[in-house]
């Protein structure tokens, strides 16, 4: 907005060359002050509208036709808008993977595929989409330097995830799973007791906190291991929730 106003100002000064440049600073300051609240309102409404469009609706039976009506893939900026807002606002059709699958099947633009590849990399469970996007990008010719570097980074992540499923991590998962089941069994036994002393409660608290530290420690070195992450989620829900 500021750039547009200043460009119009320069055009005016070029046509009416008798004018001075002294008031350009004033225009810049005024537009800068006004641009922020106006931009907040405009972009806020844009985000709100896009979020509503990506929210579940029982009347929508064919998602592909619905996305076609929205014109998501009519240009790169439009597709980027739905991807970014879908991720930042955790919209329904982004969380369930509908929007990403639609874009993968309908877009051939390098920039959009690279952006989508970068986003799905954050989710280890989306390994299939990661592989599809990775193969499509590396098959393209004349990739930009930035996207070539992105592919290099993704290849390292793919290798890291493959090596995180070794025998050592399997043994580690089995150990954590056993400890988790023991803590859950102890919690169930607590509710079966007619009376529980302080020592039992302290022991349960100690074992729960200790196992939580174990999970946090091992997840630091294995952040992309789906099995350990899922087990930790189970522990948080079953053992630490009120």
Image: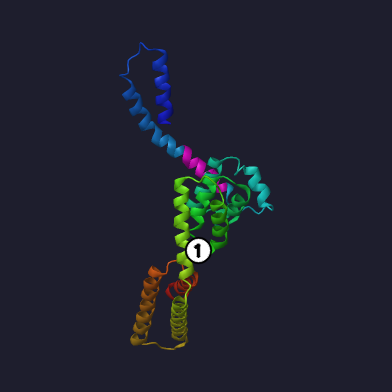
Q: Nearer the viewer, residue 187 or 109?
A: 109
Which residue is at a point 48% across and 45% down the rendered structure image? 144
Q: Is residue 8 above or below residue 145?
A: above
Magenta span: chief secondary structure: helix
Q: How many marks?
A: 1
Furthest-left residue in view? 22
Q: Is residue 37 above or below residue 102?
A: above
Position of the C terminus by quadrant: bottom left
Which residue is at a point 35% across and 32% down the rendered structure image? 33
Task: Answer whether residue 43 is magenta in the image.
Answer: yes
Residue 37 drawn at (x, y percent): 40, 36
Report which quarter residue 217 is drawn in. Answer: bottom left
In this rendering, would 80 be left or right of 65? left
Q: Which residue has dot 1 on it?
A: 124
Q: Say few, some or many: other residues with alpha carbon within 10 Å of mark 1 (under 14 / 14 to 19 / 20 or more).
A: some
Residue 80 drawn at (x, y percent): 52, 45
Residue 102 drawn at (x, y percent): 62, 51
Q: Under tag 1, what secondary structure?
A: helix
Which residue is at a point 50% across and 72% down the rendered structure image? 227
Q: Nearer the viewer, residue 240 or 231?
A: 231
Furthest-top residue in view? 18
Furthest-front residue in view? 141
Residue 242 shows up from this direction? no
Q: Nearer the viewer, residue 47 or 25?
A: 25
Q: Is residue 142 above or below residue 16?
A: below
Query: Magenta segment range?
Result: 42-52
């Amino acid at each position: 907005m500021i750039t547009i106003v200043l460009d119009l100002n320069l055009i005016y000064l070029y046509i009416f060359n008798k004018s001075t440049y002294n008031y350009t600073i004033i225009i810049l300051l005024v537009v800068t002050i006004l641009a922020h609240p106006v931009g907040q309102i405009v972009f806020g409404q844009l985000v709100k509208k896009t979020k509503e469009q990506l929210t579940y609706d029982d009347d929508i039976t064919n998602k592909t036709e619905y996305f076609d009506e929205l014109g998501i893939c009519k240009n790169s900026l439009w597709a980027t808008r739905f991807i970014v807002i879908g991720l930042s606002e955790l919209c329904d059709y982004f969380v369930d993977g509908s929007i990403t699958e639609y874009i993968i099947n309908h877009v051939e633009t390098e920039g959009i595929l690279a952006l989508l590849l970068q986003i799905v990399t954050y989710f280890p469970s989306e390994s299939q989409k990661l592989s599809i996007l990775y193969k499509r990008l590396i098959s393209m010719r004349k990739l930009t330097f930035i996207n070539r570097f992105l592919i290099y980074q993704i290849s390292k992540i793919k290798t890291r995830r493959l090596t995180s499923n070794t025998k050592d991590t399997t043994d580690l998962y089995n150990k954590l799973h056993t400890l988790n089941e023991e803590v859950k069994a102890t919690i169930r036994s607590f509710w079966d007791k007619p009376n529980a002393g302080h020592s039992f409660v302290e022991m349960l608290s100690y074992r729960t906190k200790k196992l939580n530290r174990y999970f946090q420690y091992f997840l630091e070195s294995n952040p992309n291991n789906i099995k350990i992450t899922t087990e930790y989620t189970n522990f948080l829900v079953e053992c630490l929730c009120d």
